[in-house]
Structures are given as structure tokens and as C-alpha cells.
Image (cartoon, rainbow, N blue to C red):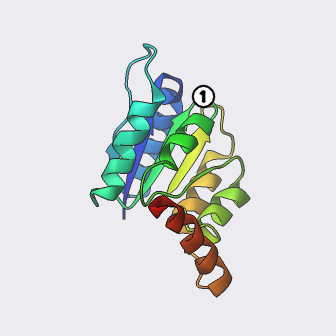
Amino acid sequence: MRIGIANDHHGIELKKKIINYLKNKNIEYVNYGCDIEDNVDYVDYAIKLCKGIQNKEIDYGILVCGTGIGMSIVANKMKGIIAGKVNTPREAALVKEHNMANVMTLAEYTENLDEILDNFINTKPSTLERHKRRVEKILSLENN
């Protein structure tokens, strides 16, 4: 498994914590994010990470901005991406299990980070037909 991480100027510190977590778990990662505190456009970094998924450079992505909302909006505009804004460890598991998300977005002030990352990385997408059906409906919107 290879995880991409991207952030804007708000997410630098949280990204460092995520990278440390991934290193400690021996999980490969690609840093698509910003490493300077100058004001940048989160849109550009979300696009880089999502293209990494589309090009099969990475399997999953984690996006960080001030609130996680802007990154989520951008990611969900990209073909083949299902992104969810996560606030809690439970949401991290459910966004992957029920929504089959390949991207999780976080706010710079995220708490319980290790548990959120554990749940997102280790949860398997559901095999229940109702969840598959709903995700197929979501992805079909990209073709209309």
C-alpha cells in the first residue's frame, strides 16, 4: 500500500505527524504537499494528489487544509475519486467501509490522529451490495 499526502500552508505540521506515523508503520508514502508557510492554493495540491491516484502512483490519499472542506470539494470533482472529510476515528472507518473512499480529508486541528489513520488505513471496503450500489451511483455521476 502506498499513501499520498498533500496539504496547503495550513497543513504542514499535521502532515509531519502523518509522515511520522507512516514511517513508524513502514507504509510507503508520497508527499504531494506544500512545505512552505507562504499562502498557497489548496486546489493545486488536491489536484496533484488525486492525479497520483488516477495514475496509480498511490493507492489512497490524505489531504489536509485549514478545515479539510476545500480539499474534499476539489477531490470529489476529480474522476474516480471519492473523498470524505473526517473528524473522528469512527468516520475514518466508515468513509472507507461504507463509501469506499480513496481519499480522506482532514483539518489542520485534527485530534486523535493515530486512531483516525489506523481506521482509514486498516478498514476494508464493505462487500455488502447496498454499499456497492450506492458508490456505483456516485461514480456514475461523473459520466453525466
| Residue plotted at (63% across, 61% down) | 95
The spot of residue 56 in percent (x, y) is 29, 61
Q: Quadrant of the N terminus?
A: bottom left
On the picture, is 27 further left or further right than 107? left
Relative to residue 85, is residue 59 depicted above or below? Answer: below
Relative to residue 20, is residue 103 depicted above or below? Answer: below
Q: Looking at the image, which residue sits at the far top?
A: 38
The spot of residue 121 in percent (x, y) is 51, 62
Q: Quadrant of residue 32?
A: top left
Marks counted in the figure total 1
Q: Looking at the image, which residue sits at the far front?
A: 144
Residue 68 appears in the figure: no
| Residue plotted at (67% across, 65% down) | 94
- Give the camera-side residue of 104 and 70: 70
| Residue plotted at (51% across, 68% down) | 140
The spot of residue 26 in percent (x, y) is 37, 58
| Residue plotted at (49% across, 46% down) | 75
**Amino acid bearing label 1:** Gly
Dot 1 crowding, Cα within 10 Å, few <14, some 14–19, many 20+: some
Q: In which quarter of the image is residue 2?
A: bottom left
On the picture, is 72 further left or further right than 111? left
The spot of residue 96 in percent (x, y) is 58, 65
Residue denoted by label 1: 66
- Give the camera-side residue of 135 and 13: 135
Judged from the image, the secondary structure of the residue bearing numbered disc 1 is loop
Relative to residue 17, is residue 101 depicted above or below? Answer: below
